[in-house]
Amino acid sequence: MSRRTRPWTRGEIEELLQRPSAVERAMVSLYEQQTDDEREGSTGSVNKNNRRGFATKTVARGTYFARWVLGDRRLSGKFIDEAREIAMFHAAQLTRIANERMENPPPTLPSPPRPPGTSGTSEAPIPDSPRFIRKKGRVVGTEPINKLGLPPYCEDVPL
């Protein structure tokens, strides 16, 4: 995938949100924007007016969807539609997140050595998986390893 050189627009992000993988990625990106204390509890909460993460009216469902995706599951049916509505509501914030990630891409590790006689210098993303934070057996958040701890089908989504 070639490196993008111009900023994302809100319209481009809204168009991208027609893809289910982008909607799932958006839920996790918004969830990661919540502060640690906002992520606690069964449905999350909004206790800071910092314009980051979910809004008061979207926090319960958005948190549920993000935790569902972080558990290596896919959203489908009416749930993907509901998550898409939440993502569209937060399109301006998702545009800002995508542009921040474009300016500061996640770290990469060099690819394994190539056999002699081959050329190319590609870099592979750092492998990771979310580490779940549990309280009384419930997942209340994730310990961010980096911002891309998502299933492979979400890798090409800039959110």
Image (spheres, rainbow, N blue to C red):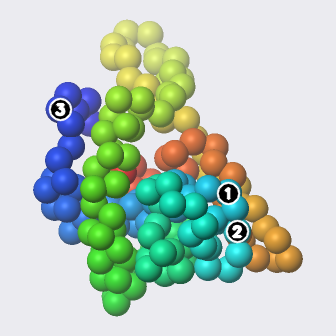
Q: Judge whether 85 appears above or below 122 on screen.
A: below
For the image, the number of numbered tags is 3
Q: Callout 2, which amino acid? A: Glu
Q: Is there a contact, CB below 8 Å, between mark 1 and mark 3? A: no
* Real-space Cα separation, disc 1 to disc 2, in angstroms: 7 Å
Horizontal side of residue 88 vs 109, given as left or right: left
Which residue carries the number 1 mark? 36
Q: Judge whether 74 appears above or below 127 on screen.
A: below
Horizontal side of residue 10 vs 148, given as left or right: left
- The answer to which of marks 2 and 3 sits earlier in the sequence is 3
Please tell me which residue is depicted at 48% across the width and 75% down the height of the picture.
Answer: 56
Instruction: Tell which tag, 2 or 3, sits nearer the viewer.
Output: 2
Instruction: Tell which tag, 1 or 3, sits nearer the viewer.
Output: 1
Q: SS at mark 3?
A: loop
Q: Which one is in front, 29 or 74?
A: 29
* Real-space Cα separation, disc 2 to disc 3, in angstroms: 36 Å
Query: Can you say which quadrant of the picture contains the N terminus?
Result: top left
The crowding category of the residue bearing disc 3, from other C-alpha atoms within 10 Å (few below 14, some 14 to 19, many at least 20), is: few
Which residue carries the number 3 mark? 6
- The answer to which of marks 1 and 3 sits earlier in the sequence is 3
Please tell me which residue is depicted at 63% across the width and 48% down the height of the picture.
Answer: 144
The crowding category of the residue bearing disc 2, from other C-alpha atoms within 10 Å (few below 14, some 14 to 19, many at least 20), is: some
Residue 99 x %, y %: 31, 39
Please tell me which residue is depicted at 35% across the width and 83% down the height of the picture.
Answer: 82
Q: Which mark is residue 57?
A: none
Q: Is there a contact, CB below 8 Å, between mark 1 and mark 2? A: yes
Residue 17 x %, y %: 25, 64
Residue 70 x %, y %: 57, 65
Which residue carries the number 2 mark? 40
Q: Callout 1, which amino acid? A: Asp
Q: Which one is in front, 73 or 140?
A: 140
Q: Which one is in front, 37 or 125?
A: 37
